[in-house]
Image (cartoon, grey):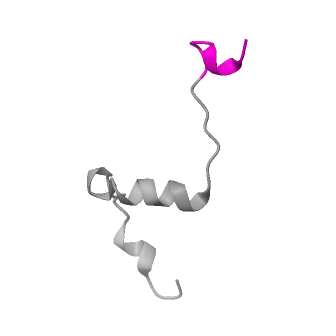
């Protein structure tokens, strides 16, 4: 019995960074943007 068949564990899939970012880019319009304070881009940053 593998851990993938247990209902308490999530399904794991090993992948590459390229594949991950390609998948994220295809859903970019659905992802929220973080609201950063304007002080984060002050002098010296």
Q: Is residue 36 above or below residue 16?
A: below
Q: Any magenta on residue 36?
A: no
Q: Among all residues in the image, which is located at the extreme bottom?
A: 43
Return the residue nearer the eye: 6 or 44: 6
> Which residue is painted at 40% across and 74% down in the image?
39
> Which residue is painted at 52% across and 54% down in the image?
20
Name the spot of residue 36 as percent of width and height, x first.
38, 64
Residue 33 sits in which quadrant? bottom left
Name the spot of residue 5 as percent of width and height, x first.
62, 15
Q: Any magenta on residue 3?
A: yes
> Which residue is painted at 47% across and 88% down in the image?
43
Secondary structure that dominates the magenta span: loop
Residue 28 sits in which quadrant? bottom left
Q: Among all residues in the image, which is located at the extreme front?
A: 1
**Direction from residue 16 to residue 45 in the image, left or right:** left
Q: Is residue 33 above or below residue 2?
A: below
Return the residue nearer the eye: 38 or 25: 25
Name the spot of residue 32 as percent of width and height, x first.
31, 52
Name the spot of residue 1 as percent of width and height, x first.
73, 11
**Direction from residue 3 to residue 44 in the image, left or right:** left
Q: Is residue 8 above or below residue 40?
A: above
Return the residue nearer the eye: 38 or 32: 32
Highlighted range, magenta: 1-9
Q: Give the number of marks.
A: 0
> Which residue is painted at 56% across and 12% down in the image?
7
Q: Among all residues in the image, which is located at the extreme left?
A: 29
């Amino acid at each position: 019995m593998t851990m993938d068949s247990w209902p308490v564990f999530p399904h794991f899939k090993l992948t590459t960074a390229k594949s991950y970012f390609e998948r994220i880019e295809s859903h970019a319009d659905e992802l929220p943007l973080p609201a950063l304070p304007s002080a984060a881009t002050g002098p010296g940053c």
